[in-house]
Amino acid sequence: MSQMPDGAPESILPQPRASWREAIAVYLQPRVLIVMFLGFSSGLPLALSGSTLLIWMREAGVDLGTIGLFALVGTPYTLKFIWAPLVDALHIPGFTRAFGRRRGWLVFSQALLIVAILLLAIADPATSPLLVALGALFVAATSATQDIVVDAFRVESLPESEQAAGMAGYVAAYRIGMLVSTAGALFLVSAFEGTGLVRANAWTWGYVTMAAMVLIGTVTALLATEPEQSARAEAATNAENAVTRVTHAAIGAFSEFLSRKDAWAALAFVVLFKFTDAFSGTMTAPFVIDLGFSRNDYAAIVKGVGLAATLIGGFAGGYVARAWSLPASLWIGGILQAIANLAFSWLALVGVNQWALALAITAENFTSAIGTVIFVAYLSALCKNPLHTATQYALLTALAAVGRTYLSSGAGYVAKATGWPLFFIICVLVAIPSLVLLGWLQRRGHFDGLGLNGRSKT
């Protein structure tokens, strides 16, 4: 690792600061705007097979046991790395020739997504819960496929100078897409009911409207240009048959990554970095209700103050990732998202106070967004080879979900045993392993040559 004149490692020093005017201007670059709109398109379908659908089912009289089983329809988001090699390697007849390797898959997956949402729209949860389950699974699978392509497109299309802004814009737009398909969809259904439609038809037209909004992503894909990295990779493998390309994408993604120095430590870091967030986030809603707040209090603050803090935090994370080196940014994000849990320990001592709740939710969402944007920067930097960008990124995000889905499953037992103030202190402490790994990887030179786009940041 090179040394600066004062003896400080170059990788931990801040990069030359850009003015706020320059920082804002980069978000208006066409490539960044394309990524932002694709982020909206990725965030939109998530709740349509999740929380919004569950509300529709409950209003239709579906029993709670059946509703609980619908959590399984989210499985494609966890297993998407299995078919990501197909996205990296296969051509879609007509689409690939007309739009290119990445854009062809984008338009194709979005067309399938529109069909899936329309099929779900005409299903009746009251009389055909199995058809609703199949429709929801179809939505989740096509949505996960779109995510695979969007992630690869984002990594390959943005130059290093625009990666941080692109990631911040993507995260913010993703959250807005989720908001549209949750609160927006519910308001829309109520509006349709207000016109005289029966509830079942109001839900149908609400989902039809959501399907139409996928066209925002389709228009964005049509206006975009194929990433140069992807075009070169396509030309390099054009003579190979489909089976060979898929095999090379699948095997190459794993072998290329595992051949790197300290690969297993890097994978452990991927699993653990957001663990502090996941461990506390699992219990945030039960904690707030247990403390004495109403669900309306919680919903209003999370959807209002929480969303604003998330959006601001996302752009702040983009600024940090652009202004500082990658390891320094990870230190900032990792420490901030950990210590934000202390706001909930404080809230547990304060009791029922809406201002205190708003402050705690703001701290959590703001720091979590910063950590997420910087973490996405790191994952993007790990995906260097355009031959299998989609496969590697899907695998890394699946590993990151391990902490959120499995390691945090015991959080309730810990909270029950310790009480709320101590529980959130423990949430701070569970960040220590990831920070130890971060320091170890930095000393081992893991970040040398890793910029925001797989290149050295100088």
Image: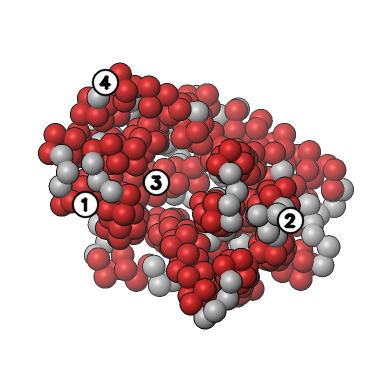
Of labels 3 and 4, earlier in sequence is: 3
Q: Is tag 4's residue or tag 2's residue first in the polypeptide sequence?
A: 2
Q: Is residue 311 above or below residue 449?
A: below
Residue, disc 3: 372
Kind of residue at disc 3: Thr
Q: In this figure, which colouring scheme has been used for the structure? A: secondary structure
Asked if the residue under mark 1 is in contact with the one under mark 2, i.e. CB atoms within 8 Å, the reply is no
Q: Nearer the viewer, mark 2 or mark 1?
A: 1
| In the rendered image, the vertical position of residue 134 relative to residue 182, given as above or below | above
Give the spatial CA distance, label 4 vs label 2: 55 Å
* 411 and 263: which is toward the camera: 411
Label for residue 16?
none
Residue 254, percent across and down?
65, 32
Is the C-beta separation of discs 1 and 3 under 8 Å?
no
Which residue, given by chain and number where applicable, does mark 2 sit on? 234
Which residue has dot 1 on it?
A: 358
Say what amino acid the circle numbered 2 marks: Glu
Whichever of callouts 4 and 1 sits on the residue coming sooner in the sequence is 1
| Callout 3 secondary element | helix
- Residue mark closest to the camera, 4 vs 2: 4
Residue 352 position in % (x across, y down): 17, 44
Q: Is residue 438 left or right of residue 31?
A: left
Residue drawn at x 65%, y 55% is 125
Q: How many marks?
A: 4
Question: In the picture provided, is 206 more to the left or to the right than 11?
Answer: right
Label 4: which residue? 418
